[in-house]
């Protein structure tokens, strides 16, 4: 649905649209190019694809839970449209609940835990590198901030991200690569590290869950992705 909406928005840019502005040909071309990495990601409606919490029983309780998640999506989309009125007006199809729910669902199914170096630490290191005269001028402001943060100033930023190549990998409980993203990375890339020798043409696979867990635990976690793993390790 999201991919179709982007294509439709691009197609609608011909003829009557102005050359400049949020709906002009240049903007539509940029939109199509920006969407390209995300077109490969598997997409599903967010409130349907998210894992059912352990404290939520199946049946009516689960239905109520998913309904509440849908309400959150509706509210979030409203806030997004209010924050970006020009794009929301220019591309109403992209700001529909159907597309929004699939984009968030794509992230739900494909996100990877990441950590990046603290930008706050980078800021204070940059202050330290200033010429003495400029450094003396800003330290009365930065000094109290550094004292208040104490050792927390260098804590890495942790979160989740979407990486197009990594999202294309199938799961295998005996994978040949593992994603690496830690606070030493500064280029925003996800690195796939080989776990063993890989033959030319061999499919790259990763494990979506903790591969050290037993079969039952892995299958319980993988059920959140909507499939039962049939890799060689699980069939043994």
Image: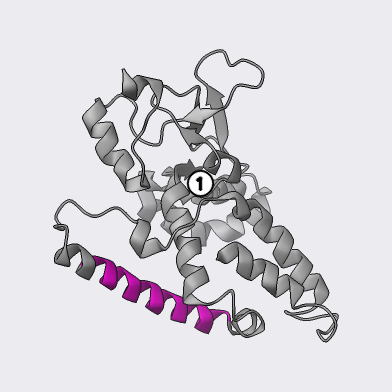
Looking at the rendered structure, the secondary structure element under dot 1 is helix
Q: Mark 1 points at which residue?
A: 121
Where is residue 30 shown, x and y percent of the image?
Answer: 75, 65
Q: Is residue 29 above or below residue 144?
A: below
| Residue under the image location 17 percent in, 51 percent down | 54
Q: Which quarter shows the C terminus? A: top left
Residue stretch in magenta: 65-84
Left or right of 202 on screen, residue 107:
left
> Magenta segment: does it hold 46?
no
Where is residue 78 shown, x and y percent of the image?
Answer: 45, 81
Q: Can residue 66 be seen in this view?
A: yes
Where is residue 103 shown, x and y percent of the image?
Answer: 50, 62
Relative depth, front residue between 193 and 155: 193
| Residue under the image location 56 percent in, 27 percent down | 204
Q: In this view, does 103 lie above or below 189?
A: below
Magenta stretch: dominant secondary structure: helix
Relative depth, front residue between 30 and 122: 30
Left or right of 137 on screen, residue 78:
left
Q: Which quarter shows the N terminus? A: bottom right
Where is residue 192 shown, x and y percent of the image?
Answer: 56, 30
Q: Is residue 189 visible?
A: no
> Magenta segment: does it hold 77?
yes
Q: Residue furthest top?
A: 197
């Amino acid at each position: 649905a999201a991919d179709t909406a982007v294509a439709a928005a691009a197609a609608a840019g011909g003829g009557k649209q102005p050359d400049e502005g949020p709906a002009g040909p240049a903007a539509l071309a940029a939109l199509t190019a920006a969407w390209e990495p995300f077109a490969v990601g598997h997409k599903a409606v967010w409130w349907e694809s998210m894992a059912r919490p352990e404290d939520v029983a199946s049946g009516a309780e689960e239905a109520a839970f998913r309904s509440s998640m849908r309400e959150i999506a509706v509210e979030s989309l409203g806030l997004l449209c209010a924050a970006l009125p020009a794009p929301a007006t220019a591309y109403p199809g992209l700001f529909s609940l159907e597309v929004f729910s699939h984009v968030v669902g794509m992230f739900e199914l494909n996100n990877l835990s990441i950590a990046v170096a603290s930008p706050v630490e980078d800021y204070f290191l940059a202050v330290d590198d200033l010429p003495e005269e400029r450094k003396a001028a800003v330290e009365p402001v930065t000094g109290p901030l550094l004292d208040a943060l104490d050792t927390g100033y260098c804590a890495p930023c942790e979160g989740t991200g979407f990486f197009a190549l990594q999202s294309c990998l199938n799961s295998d409980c005996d994978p040949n690569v593992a994603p690496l993203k830690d606070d030493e990375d500064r280029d925003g890339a996800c690195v796939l590290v080989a776990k063993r020798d890989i033959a030319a043409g061999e499919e790259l696979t990763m494990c979506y869950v903790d591969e050290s867990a037993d079969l039952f635990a892995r299958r319980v976690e993988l059920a959140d992705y909507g499939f039962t793993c049939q890799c060689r390790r699980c069939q043994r």
